Image: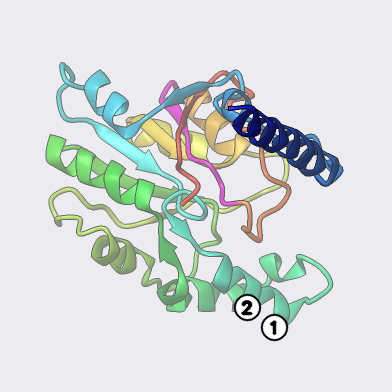
Amino acid sequence: MQKFRHVLGALCLWAAFSSAAVYASAPTPVATGTNVAKLSEQAAVHWVSVAQIESSLVERPPMAVGFDIDDTVLFSSPGFWRGKKTWSPDSDAYLHNPEFWEKMNNGWDEFSIPKEVARQLIAMHVKRGDTIFFITGRSQTKTETVSKTLQDDFHIPAANMNPVIFAGDQPGQNNKVQWLKDKKIRIYYGDSDGDITAARESEARPIRVLRAANSTYQPLPQAGAFGEEVIVDSDY
């Protein structure tokens, strides 16, 4: 028994020293780190899901809804990046070059990636029987294949689809407002501040779609800054 006690004592002592050694050899933290509680914190914005938007429309009859295109329904940065590298590597002057828009509106969206959130939203609105409009700030060109690309990408029936409206982009003027009014748009989805303000000015319901962090359109807007609804996980 005495021998057993000595062995047990030795084992306890060894365990204590081993534990101390482990703690002593722990690396020094180089950052603040995080935990589950911190990860669960969200910015103070009005987050909504596609399901919640659908639920909010249950009692509403079919309506006209509008979508911005770039960074809202399509991740179109590949085409914009190519345009920049081709016409103005050191500036955004390519955005004012008609040659760029001819290319972008007539084929370069083949390299654009449809966003998953747009698939869900458009499918939901098609199921409701809503009329879908795409109203973009892109410059208008004589011809365009964007309408067909969007219809094919998102499987939009002809009865729900309308040709893309190219509102253009002029300094100090939000060209989308009048189009939203003319088409009696009741909900407008967009990623930019201009999309949200255009919806508000036209008395449409503004809903923000998050812009992907690696978009060529920088800086990223502050989603929720106007108190609008922001769709969760809508950056892809």
Query: In the drawing, what numbered circle is on residue 86?
Result: 1
Residue 178 location, x and y as percent? Answer: 47, 35
Element carrying mark 2: helix
Residue 32 location, x and y as percent? Answer: 79, 34
Query: Which stretch appears magenta?
Result: 203-212
Query: In the drawing, what numbered circle is on residue 70?
Result: none
Residue 79 lies in magenta, yes or no?
no
Q: Say left or right for 222 vs 124.
A: right
| Contact check, label 1 and label 2, Cβ < 8 Å | yes
Q: Nearer the viewer, residue 164 or 210?
A: 210
Element carrying mark 1: helix
Q: Say left or right for 214 vs 143.
A: right
- 227 lies above or below 158: above
Residue type at the position of mark 1: Thr
- 213 lies above or below 109: above
Q: Tell me how many marks there are.
A: 2
Q: Which residue is mark 2?
A: 82
Residue type at the position of mark 2: Arg
- 67 lies above or below 74: above
Overall secondary structure of the magenta section: loop
Q: Residue at x 36, y 52 (%)?
A: 116
